[in-house]
Amino acid sequence: MVFFTLEFAIVLLLFCFIYWKFKAYQNTLLLLFNYMVLLWINPYFAYVVGIYTIVIYLLGNLIYTYQTKTMLLLSLGLVILNLAFFKYFASIKDSFDTIFTLVGLNVINIDILFPLGLSFYTFASITYLCAIAKTKQVAHFLDLATFLSFFPTFISGPIMRSDFFFAQLHKERYFGKTNLIFMLILSGLIKKVLCAGYLQIYSDSILQNPADYSILSLLLGIYAYAVRLYCDFSGYVDLVSAFALILGFTLPQNFNMPYAARNIKEFWGRWHISLSLFIRDYIYIPLGGNKKGFLLAQLFVLIAFSLSGIWHGNTFNFLIWGLLHGLGTICFNCMRACKISIPIPYASTLLTFHFVTFAWVFFYYPSLDDAFFYFESFWVNSTKPLQDSEILACFFCGIAFILYPLCTNIEIKCALLFRKIPFILQPCILACCLILIIGFSPSGIPNFIYAGF
């Protein structure tokens, strides 16, 4: 991942100096830097985004010219087909290759590289096309190009809507919130480089060999994976939020203590918030939302979560993962309709956490057999002796779960605390933190899980 290289840090600092030195040309400089980052990662990605931007610009103008629902639906259909083609090309190709071989036709061996960030700038473009239909306004081509290639959100979001971005692009920006920027960078590095790195090593050692471990270790393994997912993605969001703040932009909030949620619906109001709101506003509500009765509303919930699962991957496991969350949400809606609640403190949060965590099993394993084998191992390995270290680890997990709510807005709290430190000491503290993070982090340059989606 280019964001974790020393070269990128140096280039970003040089760019920021030029960016704030020549404020009259900030938008042009930002567009050029966006494409420089894309070319740096892979020139292929820059070409794809450039062509895609031209297509979206043309589609936007067609929607503006004709101002019909049919044109909007055709445009959205084309955008979604483009995403589906690249995302599922490998599976489709294998199926067609098999059919062609059976009928004796020669098969041309063609491989297409999945463009980095395709899902997220596709979602961004959908918000833009829908905004045109609603506001009857089109963006300047260069503004649209900057929006779709905005490097902080390009790889893995958060999903930033066009009106939210353009409002910031068209107003004067100021450099500030330095303490928050420093804390977000440190938070992102600690979560992603340290926590997610070691949690990946620990969870993989257990989840890839479930037959070798006791039931407590199996439990600790999936706990570690659940926390790793959060640290990986929220760490990324912290980092790119800092990059955006450096440029005078604010990104939409994407995480808010998700494992403190008291029910599955609240969880999706705290986890990957920009995706949750996108699904609500562009899938659930257009289907009919809750305006067509309680039963149909639950069906729409199931459809929305199923599509979310399929978007994450083209295996049956991802569909099951989406369906589980959909069914969990429906169960909660039914309980709320019947006025059923869990009055015991922490009980609902604990239940929600375990529901989400065990649903991650289908997110982790590539096949249904692997996922079922993990669950089967709880029964098969029930006679394995428990180690003192496993019992102690479970005890500390319980303590961490109880103390977890204290971490609310921890980056802002740390920024306020950091501000009280004498200015002359701040660089020394930051340097020491960075040295410790780099020194204790696992070897290698980390990648983000959601970069593949």
Image (spheres, helix red, strand yellow):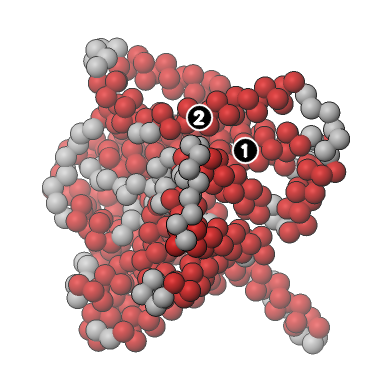
Structural crowding at the residue carrying mark 1, measured as other residues with C-alpha within 10 Å and reported as few (<14), some (14–19) or many (≥20): many
Q: Nearer the viewer, residue 421 or 321?
A: 321
Please tell me which residue is depicted at 69% across the width and 52% down the height of the picture.
365
Q: At 57% across and 48% down in the image, what residue appears?
A: 356
Residue 238: give x, y in percent of width and height.
39, 38
Q: How many marks?
A: 2
Q: Which residue is mark 2?
A: 402
Q: Is residue 159 visible?
A: yes
Q: Is residue 26 above or below residue 63?
A: above
Q: Going 26% across and 56% down the picture, which residue do you hit?
A: 165
Horizontal placement of 180 versus 381: left or right?
left
Residue 314 position in % (x across, y down): 62, 65
Look at 19% across and 56% down and name the residue there: 167
Report the residue marked by disc 1: 223
Amino acid type shown at disc 2:
Ile
Q: Rounded to the nearest whole Å, what is the CA distance between mark 2 and mark 1?
A: 15 Å
Which quadrant would residue 367 be assigned to in this image? bottom right
Secondary-structure class at tag 1? helix
Picture quadrant where residue 310 is located: bottom right
Q: Nearer the viewer, residue 301 or 85?
A: 301
Q: Nearer the viewer, residue 216 or 107?
A: 216
